[in-house]
Amino acid sequence: MTSKSSEAAAARSLLSAAAVRERAHELFAIALDGRLPDWTIAMERLPAAADFVASTVRDRYPDLAVPFHARWRHFVLAGRDLWAEASTGLTDPAGRARAAFDLAITSVLLDAGAGAGWRFVDPASGVVAARSEGLGVASLRLFESGALSDRPGEPLRADAGRLSRLEVETLAEGFQVSEANPLVGLEGRAALLRRLGETVAARPDLFAIADAPRPGGLFDVMAASAEGGRLPAAVILEVLLEALGPIWAGRLSLGGVPLGDCWRHPALRRDDATDGLVPLHKLSQWLAYSLIEPLQAAGVAVTGIDGLTGLAEYRNGGLFVDLGVLVPRDPAAPIRRRPVDDTLVVGWRALTVALLDEIAPLTRQRLGVGEADFPLARVLEGGTWAAGRAAARQRREDGSPPVAVDSDGTVF
């Protein structure tokens, strides 16, 4: 095996949820041993954090009927299911699934942190939404307007050609961006969708099996990968990481294989080309969670949902910092704004993944539910994400996260 091919094989070993979990827990063990730069862990505070999460779940879902953590939650506004309203004319199950994939993929890729000052006023209802909810509604309204479609009369699609030509001005108009309403990483978001269009056009074997090249073409790949109508959730992520890897500009690659949301940390050691590499794949896993429901609606049973990990983002991570489970060695360090590849940020995100695995069973115990009925996807949706937001609002007037990160609009 040549050096490049061996590096490519090593790179592919990082493109899975299992790799995210394994390396996150390795850094977690190092931190518990007191050997991790930037962070220590106060495990004695985790039970109180679990109390807070369980209380948050009960407040939000008294009947404990918690849906999966997915983008679809953000398409419900003031009691109205906006996607259900927009898609009533899509009666063919496969066609509806491709449209849902188009929406979920573009919307999730636009879902990095909006910043504390941005708001979206829904033109249909007048409801004002911010942060992830606002981004969700804005992206749905952009999608249903036909702004991502190349076919007049068929607005509910995202075509490769239209995506590759997407202008910043189109996105700014759709998201109501102005000097008075700034959106963090606007240019980065538009560039990401353009790269998505280029990537989709370049891989008809993945994106154009049953239609013109579109992100939603991945539905056909995943449906064909199902055995006996059953598809492991981990496979959803693996397909996404292979198909969408080229869209992440300026990221690490190994043996010609783009690594996506994968960063270096000196504490994680290997004796191969993956030495120091920490995969996190936050947006890709958020997207994997968000594709479960369209697949199920099209008749594909998704199994092994806990094969995915918790999401390494600032609400889940902020929960553990704000509740004193994750403790910075330098108390002032988190408030000094730093890039996403900083070791403090990489360590914070990896420890978040591991701690979500630790807090999930404690939360279930407090709720009196089992893992089979209450997988991690429900713990995230019902509790940790919302609890992280609540903890931030209790401590900072603007609800900002406790760690200041410079985002280009493609990570958080």
Image: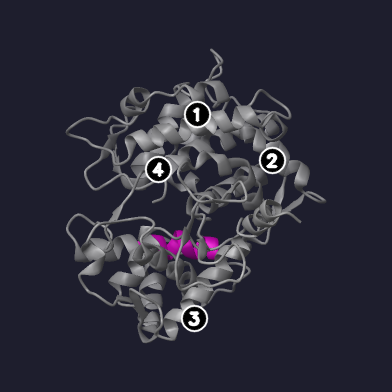
> Mark 3 highlights which residue?
29
Which quadrant, please, contains the N terminus? bottom right
Q: Is residue 299 above or below residue 46?
A: above
Q: Point out the stretch of residues depicted in magenta.
A: 376-386
Cα distance between the residues tagged 1 and 2: 18 Å
In the rendering, at what x and y percent does residue 299 appear? 72, 44
Q: Is residue 252 above or below residue 198?
A: below
Apparent side of residue 111 relative to residue 92 in the rendered image (left or right): left
> Mark 1 highlights which residue?
86
Cα distance between the residues tagged 1 and 3: 47 Å
Tags 1 and 3 in contact by the CB under 8 Å rule?
A: no
Q: Is residue 167 above or below residue 23?
A: above
In the rendering, at what x and y percent does residue 128 appear? 27, 38
Of residue 401 and residue 134, the one placed in the foreground of this image is 401
- Which of the two marks, 2 or 3, is nearer to us in this view? 3
Is disc 1 placed on a helix, strand or loop?
A: helix
Mark 2 or mark 3, which has the lower sequence index? 3
> Mark 4 highlights which residue?
79
Cα distance between the residues tagged 3 and 4: 43 Å
Magenta segment includes 350: no
> Mark 2 highlights which residue?
298
- Which of the two marks, 2 or 4, is nearer to us in this view? 2
Of residue 369 and residue 2, the one placed in the foreground of this image is 2
What residue type is disc 3 on?
Answer: Ala
What residue type is disc 4 on?
Answer: Gly
Dot label at residue 292: none
Magenta segment includes 377: yes
